[in-house]
Image: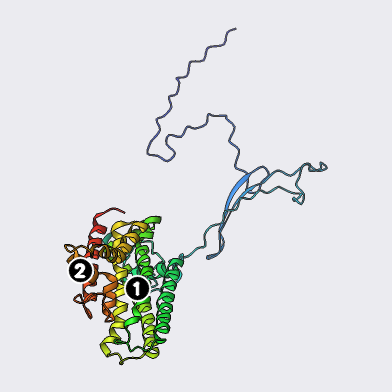
Amino acid sequence: MTSPQQPEQPQQQPEPHDTDAPGAGVPMPPAGAPEPPAQPPAGAPGTMMLQAQQQPAGAPGTMMLQAQQPPAPQGTPAQNAPHGAPKDAGTMMLQAQQPPAGPVPPQQPYQQPGQEAHAGGQPQVPAAWQGGGPGGAAPGYVSPIPVRRTNLGHALASEWTKIRSVRSTMWTLGAMIILVVGVGLLTALALSTTDQTFDPLLGGAWFGLLLGTLCVIPLGVLVISSEYGTGMIRTTFTACPSRARVLTAKAIVLFGLTFVITTVSTTLVSLLHAGMLDGPAPTGDQWLRATVGAGLYVALLSLLAMGAGSLLRHSAGAISAMTGLVLLPMLLAVFMIGSESLQPLAKAMIQYSIPSSLGAIYGQPFLAGGPEGWQPLLVLAGVTAVVLGGAYAALEKRDV
């Protein structure tokens, strides 16, 4: 017997989801599907938990990453467990130190040693470094070395250090003092054995000074030519780019040193002659020319030698040229005096030679009619000015 067929039920269409309703677009699980397990409670075995534990305000915070493992079965010893680990669930923590809560105190600016700070706490910037940044602001770096402009005083200090620290200077000046004082003393002893009366009384004190000039000439040349020979003139001009200032400083130091030493030496010799020889007392002008005048003459001669060294830039050549200037006119005049046509020239060479001019300062020229008194000093000053002028011009135009 056949059972009657059941009429087919129409297939139900799913209702459209309301996109505006809460949970719209989320698929619903089919009917009869098992429900998803609920989340285990915190601290259950086998869970990993990330906790952020905040400490009280002002204390550093602690970030902890904790992984809890299920307890080991009872009766089973925990293998490979670290020594000192707890018997229950293992814990692994990752701590991160957080900066303290609250405002960060301002950092004090770095202050170089020896710098003074203003009232606002900012380091004092030298005037030469101010306005270096954008908008006239102070630069970020301040040199601890004081910055100041150089002047002639710095060049004088440098040249004085050079000339007194070189052993050749001391040897040269020492030899000059021995010659001037020693020869002057021997001359006074030789003249005192005679019964003659000397007028002027200080006329014989210049013999030792003439030999002393042979020591001053190398000193004046080596003041500048030695730096050209060793190449140190490049370092000097790098430290002081003003070449005229360098030459001026050398001239001042050399002139002052030779003037003081020569004046002291000639004063001592003049006192020896005045006390050991017979004759009329020297006048004030004679004393002044025999001491200060002689010192000025030798100092100008050293400047003339320095000018020759600056022009020639060679020590041996400049010393030879200056020695020839001192001695050669007298030697040539001796051979020219026999010729009648050359006698006027020979006479002028003798009268204006350096030995005769030096004797004229003491009142004992070789030939009458030449420069007298202070005139030899003026003639040498003019010649020295011309040579130094050429040295300044050549120094500015020529390369080192």
Q: Which residue is drawn at 32% across and 69% down?
A: 302
Reply above or below: 38 against 307. Answer: above
Observer-nearest of 149 and 214: 214
Tell me residue 306's x, y (percent). 31, 65
Reply above or below: 49 against 188. Answer: above
**Residue furthest bottom in the image:** 281
Dot 2 lies on which element? Answer: helix
Residue bearing the label numbered 1? 210
Distance of label 2 from label 1 (alpha carbons): 20 Å
Q: Which residue is drawn at 23% across and 79% down?
A: 374
Q: Quadrant of residue 119 in the image? A: bottom left
Is residue 292 rendered to the left or right of residue 87? left
Amino acid type at mark 2: Ala
Give me the disc on residue 348: 2
Amino acid type at mark 1: Leu
Observer-nearest of 226 and 114: 226
Q: Quadrant of residue 213 in the image? A: bottom left
Residue 52, can we see it?
yes
Asked if the residue at tag 1 contacts the one at tag 2, i.e. Cβ–Cβ closer than 8 Å, the answer is: no
Mark 2 neighbour class, 10 Å CA radius: few under 14, some 14 to 19, many 20 or more: some
The tag earlier along the polypeptide, 2 or 1, is 1
Q: Quadrant of residue 227 in the image? A: bottom left
Mark 1 neighbour class, 10 Å CA radius: few under 14, some 14 to 19, many 20 or more: many
Dot 1 lies on which element? Answer: helix
